[in-house]
Structure formats: C-alpha cells, structure tokens
Image (cartoon, helix red, strand yellow):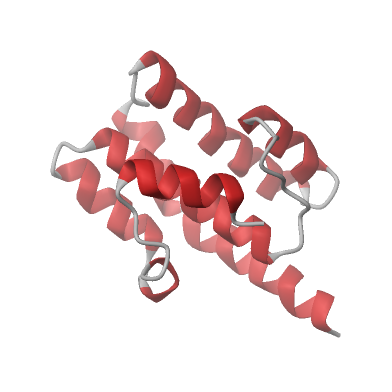
Amino acid sequence: RVWRMRRLATQEGIDLDVLPALDDIGESARTLWQQREPRAAMALLYVASLYELSASEIPLDDSHTELECVELATRSLDEKSLQYFTRITQAWLSQAYAHKPPDNGEFLALCDQWRPFLQYLQTMQRAAQI
C-alpha cells in the first residue's frame, strides 16, 4: 500500500524510513518553504498524508490518481479531515503539474493544520486495532 507514496517520495527525495521519525511534518514543511523550496515542502505534506492514510487502512492502490485518493478518503474521514486532505491534494496538483505553489497564507495554514489531521488519523488507527 505504499505504492504511489514510495514512487513520489523517491522522485521528490523524501526518505520514507525517516518520515515517521520527523517530529512535526508541518514544521519540517514550513522550514522547506522558508528555504524557498515550495515543491519539496508540498511534496512532504502530500507524501506524509498518503503515508498516514495508508496506515489508517484506507485502501489506496497504485492505479489511483490523486483525485481518486480523495474519493477513497471520502469513505473514511470526517468532514474536517477530508477537507484538509482535499486542500493538500489540490495544492500538490497545482504545484506538481502547473508549477504554481499555494500562496503563503494557504501553505502556512496547511502546515498549522497538519498536527490535528495526524491526530485524527492516529485515533482512527487505534480504533481499528481494537
């Protein structure tokens, strides 16, 4: 299930073995943004979101496009988390394919909202283990 995430991580230079050890993905992405690395910053947020969705048993597959991943997430996420993942996906698509990063305010909001998104997904993961 780490399909797309592994391919994208490799393309963007993200080490998936280190990803879970990063203390705060939002802060790490913010640092990249401040270093004028918008693609790397967006890639980190997007890959980390796929990583956590996959860990939450959302059935992502290699053949799914970004928008299909959002569709699959619709079945499992609450409204607030789905909106967040949708915004990350839209920002990633704009950055990756149109070479247009989100504006500063939107990007910083995505960074600030990473931790609540992660906490929600971790709660889903614990509930699935019961």
Quadrant housing the C terminus: bottom right
Residue 99 picture quarter: top left
**How many marks can you see?**
0
As drawn, which residue projects farthest toward the top? 98
Picture layout, residue 103 above or below residue 117: above
Query: Residue visible at 66% across and 58% down?
Result: 54
Quadrant housing the N terminus: bottom right
Query: Residue visible at 40% across and 33% down?
Result: 106
Relative image position of residue 87 (x, y in whole percent): 56, 34
Query: Residue visible at 57% across and 44% down?
Result: 4
**Relative to the observer, which residue lies in front, 118 or 52?**
52
**Relative to the observer, which residue lies in front, 119 or 38?**
38
Picture layout, residue 126 above or below residue 89: below
Left or right of 54 on screen, residue 114: left
Relative image position of residue 12 (x, y in whole percent): 33, 43
**Relative to the observer, which residue lies in front, 37 or 16?**
16
Relative image position of residue 32 (x, y in whole percent): 22, 47
Left or right of 36 on screen, residue 70: right
Query: Residue visible at 60% across and 68% down?
Result: 119
Left or right of 50 on screen, residue 124: right
Left or right of 61 on screen, residue 98: left
